[in-house]
Image: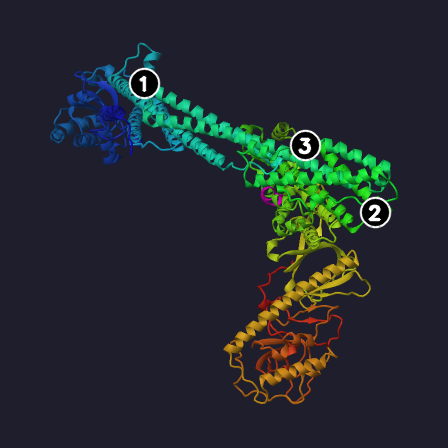
Amino acid sequence: MRFWLRNEEMALEEMVQRLNAVSKNTDEIMHQDIVPLCAADIQEQLKKRFAYLSGGRGQDGSPVITFPDYPAFSEIPDKEFQNVMTYLTSIPSLQDAGIGFILVIDRRQDKWTSVKASVLRIAASFPANLQLVLVLRPTGFFQRTLSDIAFKFNRDDFKMKVPVMMLGSVPELHGYIDKSQLTEDLGGTLDYCHSRWLCHRTAIESFALMVKQTAQMLQTFGTELAETELPNDVQSTSLVLSVHTEKKAKAKEDLQLALKEGNSILESLREPLAESTSHSVNQDQLDNQATVQRLLAQLNETEAAFDEFWAKHQQKLEQCLQLRHFEQGFREVKTTLDSMSQKIATFTDVGNSLAHVQHLLKDLTSFEEKSSVAVDRARALSLEGQQLIENKHYAVDSIHPKCEELQHLCDHVASEITRRRALLSKSLELHSLLEMSMKWCDEGIFLLASQPVDKCQSQDGAEAALQEIEKFLETGAENKIQELNKIYKEYECILNQDLLEHVQKVFQKQESTEEMFHRRQASLKKLAAKQTRPVQPVAPRPEALTKSPSPSPGSWRSSENSSSEGSALRRGPYRRAKSEMSETRQGRSSSTGDEEENLAILRRHVMNELLDTERAYVEELLCVLEGYAAEMDNPLMAHLISTGLQNKKSILFGNMEEIYHFHNRIFLRELESCIDCPELVGRCFLERMEEFQIYEKYCQNKPRSESLWRQCSDCPFFQECQKKLDHKLSLDSYLLKPVQRITKYQLLLKEMLKYSKNCEGAEDLQEALSSILGILKAVNDSMHLIAITGYDGNLSDLGKLLMQGSFSVWTDHKKGHTKVKELARFKPMQRHLFLHEKAVLFCKKREENGEGYEKAPSYSYKQSLNMTAVGITENVKGDAKKFEIWYNAREEVYIIQAPTPEIKAAWVNEIRKVLTSQLQACREASQHRALEQSHSLPLPAPSSTSPTKGSTRNVKKLEDRKTDPLSLEGYVSSSLPKPPEKGKGWSKTSHSLEAPEEDGGWSSAEELINSSDAEEDGGVGSKKLAPGKYTVVMGDEKEGPDTLAMRSGDMVEVVEEGAEGLWYVRDLTSSKEGWVPASSLSTLLGKSSSAQCLSSSDSSPGSAVLSNSSSCSEGCPTPFSELQG
């Protein structure tokens, strides 16, 4: 622990000594060391005025205490009397009190008995020295005579240490005490006001207490400062300095209040003399003034000592804060410079294309600008450290080495940036040369492909084409690589393995292109020289595309600074090639090779457009992130940001940074790898389809971003950023780029697929196109999903959103929670339905208002249906666009009318998939659970039938019943098994389930899944149903002696499993027992349970029903509770 310097400790000791002296002197001045009693403590007792100290003095200076006529004197409690006597005797100075007090007892209006009692009480309890007691006896004749006689006979009772003088009148009193020392009620001229005296005494004592408390506070504060440890960080040091300064200000404020209070009291004491110069001041008043003056002198001295101590303490804290600022700045700058040095060390990439190098140079420039800020700060910090050293800071040994280290780091960063810029400049020169060569080769290939072959049949046409080729070859001198060895030598410092291969590939492509031109020249020269017969020439294949080695991905990256003329030059031949090739195909029968070559050129053009737009897209995203998003964190721009925009960067830009990193680091490079095989670009999309989901998040945030932009578009911050970037369009145009980009991909994929029908990657392209369209649909669906309001739960718990759309809805509820049965509505409700994997939501679409994304509709949640209790009827009579969704065994029926039959078919198909998948999952879970129970429960089997034989017979019965799916005969045997013996079978209590009697089902009108189908899937004959309570889902007439007659809705308990799909059950209502088909039973569940069956909604009431051994709710995840409503 580090403490203050020794001289500061000495200053503290001196101040503490002074403050202790102040406290001691205060007690002495107020006699608190002898009698710790204040006027405030006995203020009410003093107000009674049965005794007072008027300030008068006897002839020898003895203080006079007067006991005025007080009828209730005898009723004063001894404690109060003792307190008043003690306090009054403590007020005069010790010198005056040592002489002794003179008591004047005025009893002129009293009786002798009272006089006697008062004198005896005073004599017995007076706490100080007495010099004389003067008693003014009663003035009445009888009482006066009585007092004379009584005093003579009772003189011994008044024997005291001092004489007691019985006075008959006031003039006799004046013989003992001068009139100027007596108050007016005793015939004197002394000016005395008891309330004023009490006020002065209270104020003086309060001031004395204030002085003492101030001294103690300063003493505590000084000790705290002396023991304060110097913090090791700026924030703590600033906090200590702030706290100490605040406490010092409070202490000074207390000092000033005390001084003000003392001066006010002193002025009040001097006020009578100021009003009248003839006014005489008694000794007590003089003593009061002297007391206040002594206390004020103590305060002034204390303030001076405290100010001197604080000046040293503050200097120490300020130097400590300067050091902590310097150390913090040093750590920050050193960390930044070290990070920059490490980052520069990683700058080894010299670029794989012209655009890449330009981007690297731009990054280096940006890095240099950012580093210059850190370097300038480091140099300024070094100068600051030197200034501290010159000012003789106490930590010179710590500051000097840090200054030298800062200077070294700055020089290192500057030299590394210079070296890096020189390498990139060389790389830029080389890639510019390679780019020109590649551009020359591409334009040459396009020139050869765009020459009209039919026109070259004539001599004039051939000569014109030959001149065009010769003119183009003349431009090669400026754009071609001349000497390969010279390139190797000149750019040796940057030639890594990849760049070396790239140079070689470009040179080989250049040679192949020249070879193509030479062959075309030779052919055209022959055509121009002699035309003996019409010849249908064939455009030579650009063999460079197949023979020359494939260039590296970066070779096809175009420069960001390429002119619009170059772009037009690329697009012009493309369009011309398409149109002329179309005309050529109509005018002649071109060979398959030529057609494939033309398609390859078209694919390359689409690929070039994809790459060019992708690079431009990445650059635009980077521009927005650096020019807008990063500037929102720039302290220098903070004053331009409005209050509504603060801390809203994540809302405004969404996950644009995530999108940028995906395209810049991953997708763009993978696209560049397909530049030589454009038809394989579909694989890039398929492999990264999961990453494309980030666009869904961006689009979901877009409405919030649009709303924030409309509120803050006039903010000076955006105007300043747009000015710096030299953008013609405002930020909102660039925020729309990701939305535009994700929709652009499907257009480019369609175009690529158009020219790749018979290529290797055609299937991948088709799949990629479908996937991109699926993402667009998911994005669109999610935009609708986030517009739902009023839903209390979490929409993500409902599973994946499968479909959404607007429908007309009628309701026909057979049962319900309301007491009044709701009839079918003739007027449909307009509802927007959201089909999830686990529920279907009904919402009401609200009107569209606002602009931009605010025009998007909102949806008010109305109700939802759990898919575990949903069924569908696919065909409704009278309208091909209608279908039914029913809930809880048709307890609630919703008639849905789609806009078109196609939409209806799509929805029905999707719902059927969901219900079928749920049923399959429940079947699997049921089989698994039944298998576990077969190992844990000893189930007795009939002795006459083995499981194998029963299963074989069931399979045979399945085949026989396929011709009549609605027949029930297969479930009832002519000879039923015997009932089980009493006490055997399953326990009645251990597996019983309590549930209501309602059961629902899932239906399908087009896909009748009957009992035979279910048994083939592992139905009744081969299943082990769980014991417990079941409900009858299909009535049956009694057909045998042991057959139990059932009605739909009856509740039974399974006793034993029999063969051939029969179960021995007990009716829980009538307690009757008998055999029933297992297919007629369904497990009881909770409120929303349903029989696990798929039945034909158009079938008769006696149609067969498939029942599993367990409900869907038991085999599947727990259903949503209270989804409806």
Marking on residue 280: none
Of the numbered discs 3 and 1, the one sitting upstream in the chain is: 1
Of the numbered discs 2 and 3, the one sitting upstream in the chain is: 3
Q: Position of residue 581 (x, y in %)?
A: 81, 44
Q: Amino acid at mark 2?
A: Arg
Q: Secondary structure at mark 3?
A: helix
In the depicted structure, whether residue 1064 falls above or below residue 809? below
Of the numbered discs 1 and 2, the one sitting upstream in the chain is: 1
Q: How many marks?
A: 3
Of 427 and 611, the residue lying toward us: 427
Q: Secondary structure at mark 1?
A: helix
Q: Amino acid at mark 1?
A: Leu
Which residues are drawn in magenta? 661-668
Residue ID at (74%, 79%): 964
Quarter in which the C terminus is drawn: bottom right
Marking on residue 585: 2
Q: CA separation, marks 3 and 1? A: 104 Å
Q: CA separation, marks 1 and 2? A: 121 Å
- Quadrant in the picture for residue 896: bottom right
Residue ID at (52%, 31%): 420
Q: Residues within 10 Å of mark 1 (few under 14, many from 20)?
A: many
